[in-house]
Amino acid sequence: MKIISVPRVNALGKMGPEKMGEALRTQNSDTLTNIIEKQVGARRLRTQMSEIEVDNSNVESSEKEIYSGAREIFKGKDKAVFVGGDHSITYPILKAFGEVNKNAFLIVFDAHADCDYANKEPTHEEWLRAVIEKGFVRPENVILIGVRKMWDVEKKFLEENGVKVFGDIFDLEAVADYITERANGKDVYVSVDVDVLDPAFAPAVSYPEPNGLLSRELFYLLRRIFCIKSLRALDVVEVVPEKDEKYDYRTVKVAAKIVEEFLESK
């Protein structure tokens, strides 16, 4: 099991999420250390808490560094947690994941569809469209959960490609059953943009949206998903620690809890 900080942003100049990895280490160090020690042993703690170094002034270079680092990890067959950064980190990570795992299955938690027309180096606003268009994951193997803000161009893209979208969730158990049945036997990657939660539970994100998932709803779904035997990787993105100080680091703690649940999964 590996934890990798990826302090990259490609969000049209909007900074903040790149400090998320350091915030997890400082604000939740005792809890995360205890979990990691149980999983891998204290002597390996330093190597497990690694970082992919990126240059946020050079988008092309940072994308290559993330891709190369992720590919080496996936070739080793270890489970991995990638801590963002903004959601643009998922594009190069999934490029590597799809190359190593030929039957990739993607589960995305996000308030936004992230399916605008894609740039050459996709930003946090269109990374998912690029992942599908480039063939890193087949559209029928993508599930999008918690979306409540989409442009018309994004709705059209998702509908034309047959991507399963859960916006409002009225039956948690049924949704969890559907996801786990579809993902069974495939190589599963989970991406959590913390803004999928209602701002009452995660206020310090880049683009908060009202009427999000409750904390108990998110963790119910994650716990069901984390029981999938073919689960390979998780990323957690879009927390802005500087905004979180006035909330007693409520959002950082939620992100840490997501990581802990993954580390404790079998």
Image: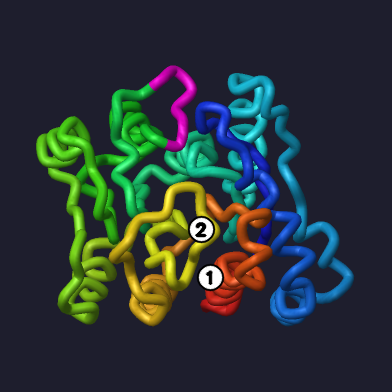
**Label placed on residue 39:** none
Q: Nearer the viewer, residue 231 or 5?
A: 5
Nearer to us in this view, 42 or 203: 203
- Quick check: 97 left or right of 127? right
Q: How many marks?
A: 2
- Residue at 53% across, 70% down: 258
Residue at the front extreme of this rendering: 246
Per the image, the residue denoted by label 1 is 258
Q: Which SS does the magenta portion mostly show?
A: loop
Residue hosting label 2:
234
Please state if 152 lies on the left or on the right of 82 as rendered. left
**In terms of sequence position, does the residue under pointer 2 or pointer 1 come before the other?**
2
Q: Does 179 lie within the magenta span? A: no
- For label 1, the crowd category at 10 Å Cα-Cα, with few meaning under 14, some 14 to 19 and many 20 or more, is many
* Above-or-below relation of 93 to 252: above
Residue for point 55% across, 31% down: 10
User: From mark 2 to mark 1, how far is it between C-alphas?
Assistant: 9 Å
- Where is 66 relative to 1, above or below? above
Residue 183 location (% of width, % of height): 29, 62
Residue density around tag 2, few if under 14, some if 14–19, many if 20 or more, within 10 Å: many
Determine if residue 75 is in view: no
Instruction: Give coordinates of residue 151: x percent, y percent.
Output: 21, 37
Q: Are marks 2 and 1 in contact (CB under 8 Å)?
A: yes
Above/below status of 202 relative to 16? below
What amino acid is found at the position of numbered circle 1 in the picture?
Ile
Residue drawn at x 29%, y 35% is 115
Q: Position of residue 215 (x, y in %)?
A: 41, 76
Q: Which residues are magenta?
A: 119-124
